[in-house]
Amino acid sequence: MILRKSLGQHFLKDEEVSRKILSALEEYHFKRLLEVGAGGGALTKYLLKIPGVELKAVEVDLEKFDYLLSTYPGLKGRLIHADFLSMDKPFDDRFTIVGNFPYNISSQIIFRAVEWKEHVECMIGMFQKEVAQRIAAPEGNKVYGVISVLVQAFYEVEYLFEVPQTAFIPPPKVRSAVIRLMPRKNIPAMRNEKDLFLLVKTAFNQRRKTLRNAVRGLFDESYLKKEIFNKRAEQLGVGDFAALTFEMK
């Protein structure tokens, strides 16, 4: 198989890592499963053996798509040749997402899960370690940022384990980590998602400034006198951002 750098391809070769991802998946009951970026099939071959599950897999690279179909006949009728970022939802009912995500679009993949949050009951994915750490970071952490807040507003994030470069062909220059997302039981009240996204992105765009200076254009001057605006963006929790949306212009 030919690796395509433009697609961020690094194929998993470590069987133990695949088994650990499978174990994390099987801790929860699910009926429908979508694998994103099936690639060389390192994880797919295990997913095909899960009993009683409706499996679909998506692969954008036509060469890998053909390879998967010829190597794993059980994928016939289950493998989708498409770009995950532009495809329609693969199931009408709730489903789980799993994958060794391409580094170059991993943030876009997780925001797709946020977009589909009413349908995604669990997501287990391998990311570049630094991205995984940002997604899971709590408030006050130096890597806590936009992606932390906007994912954690809707999902509980669990940092599961790290994966060395040697687990892949070719070895990437960075370490990887696997995280799990489960829907929050209580999503914090907010005026709407659009306002939350605007507020969070504006606040972290100038993260070294106090919140008052970073988001001045989004609130009336009188409201900006409140003490919370003396803080910087990384000092606010997800609930704080959600609550502030009700006071935006």
Image (cartoon, rainbow, N blue to C red):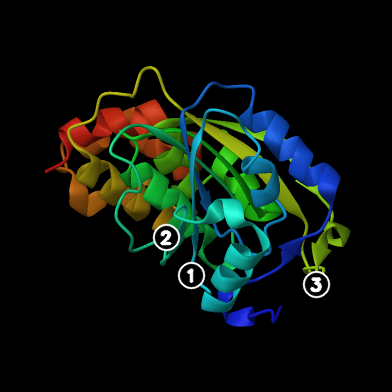
Q: Amino acid at mark 2?
A: Phe
Q: Nearer the viewer, residue 233 or 123?
A: 123
Amino acid at pointer 1: Val
Percent coordinates x, y for residue 24 in the rendering: 67, 30
Q: What residue do we see at 26% from left, 33% from top? A: 244
What residue is disc 2 on? 84
* 3 or 1: tag closer to the N-terminus: 1
Q: Is residue 121 left or right of residue 143?
A: left
For marks 2 and 3 on the same chain, the one whose residue lies earlier in the sequence? 2
| Secondary structure found at label 3 | loop
Crowd around label 2: few <14 · some 14–19 · many ≥20 (10 Å): many
x%, y% of residue 147?
A: 47, 48
Residue 139 seen in the current view: no
- Camera sees residue 182: yes
- For residue 23, side relative to residue 210 (left or right): right
In percent of width and height, residue 165 lies at 83, 60
Q: In the rendered view, tell whether residue 108 sits above or below residue 230.
A: below
